Amino acid sequence: MSVKIPYPKFEELASKQPVHLNQIKKLEYGRVLEDLDEGEVFCHPRGITLTKAFAIDFATTFMETNPLYLNEVYAKAHGFKDLVVSPLMVMNIALSLGVQNDSEKAVANLGYYNVCFVKSVYPGDTLRAMTKVLKREMKEGGKPGIATIRTIALNQNEELILQYDRKIMVASAGKKTQASTIEGQPFPEMPEPTIEMPSFPKSFPKNLTGVRTYFEDFKPGDILVHANGRTITDEHYAWTYKLMNTHPLHYDRLYSSARTGTMSGEPIVYGGLVFAWLAGLASRDTTENALLDFGYTEGYHTQPVVSGDTIAAISRVLTKEEGPAGIHAGIVTFQLMGVKNIRAPQALEKFGAELFVKENHKKKQGLEKISEKIFEIERRVLVKKRM
């Protein structure tokens, strides 16, 4: 039922109203360390309904080659009910929805942990996100501390589709600046995640993927040097907000240039976009025949990226294991590495095995960090076997 009301009359009012400079309100978003109380739950604003055009736009922009994200007929032939939304798009949206509440004042994103894609997402689904503070570590002298948070994404049926943990470095203000959220909010996390997947058919469409990315093609220890790089342009400004990330560091030059240290100067490319481009660069050689992206054990952005940087990817096969019973596929664990402003073959030649050592571990091993290295993560995927 609709209600009709008279249309308000047009009238110029600003010149008739006095300006009250004692009533200025400077609205801010995000939280300082003292605002992140352990156990607190944040319900993130907005949410977003995903269209098929948006899903394909993401997959093509970030160079995905798996037809599940591009070809509706292919996806349905594999048992999915529609084209599948790229899991990295889902993760980026879940993370970005939470920025206004949990990390818009963050100094740095320190890492992703235990990323689990629980259920596939399809065009037409509406996603929303929630975050719980798991741990807060204060530092002496008012220095920035570290908060460990868990974010979940739910679809329109309140079904859990994604769960992951993240560590963020957050500035301390010496006092609480925002009121706590309402206590007792339900937070439907999954302590021991299980994955919902189709009962894949025994035969698949052929000739729509390459012939070198089946389960049998991978061997632990293989190092895959991916052929192409990707120069990032100012396009990253628009994609940051398309995915609903509100941190000004990624699109406000006045904000970014006023900072100090390695994160000052030009706006920093939002890390989730860097991850997505690296995964896309690797996809022709690693995940083109993947059926599911299970998730990521842990990963780090080790150096910032700005517009104009060219990034490249290298993968290493860590393990192989048989897939679930009755599924003609196996599980492959990859280490995905990202470098900037150097070709992947040259990076491997220059740094050798040290490229694959986690940057956080290098100090204890007496090794220097690599300035060209920008990202590292471990990922597990379910990959088809040959018929």
Image (spheres, grey):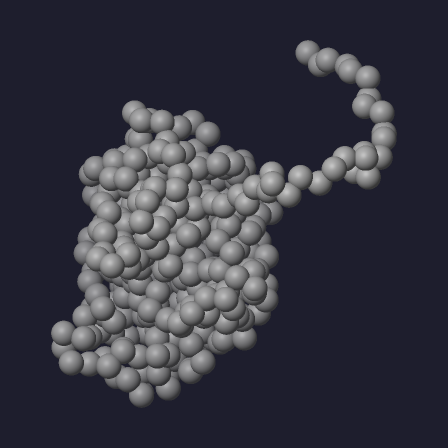
Residue 66, located in which quarter of the rendered image? bottom left
Residue 343: x %, y % from top left: 42, 82
Position of the N terminus, as image quadrant, is: top right
146 over 217 or under it: above or below: above
Residue sitting at 85 percent across and 29 percent down? 10
Residue 315: x %, y % from top left: 32, 70
Is 27 on the left or on the right of 30, as rendered? right
Residue 246: x %, y % from top left: 51, 50
**Observer-nearest residue: 192 or 113?**
113
Residue 118: x %, y % from top left: 32, 40
Residue sitting at 22 percent across and 45 percent down? 135
2 over 213 or under it: above or below: above
**Observer-nearest residue: 74 or 189?**
189
185 over 37 or under it: above or below: above
Residue 131 in sight in this render:
yes
Is 125 on the left or on the right of 186, as rendered? right
Residue sitting at 51 percent across and 56 percent down? 248
Residue 200, located in which quarter of the rendered image? top left
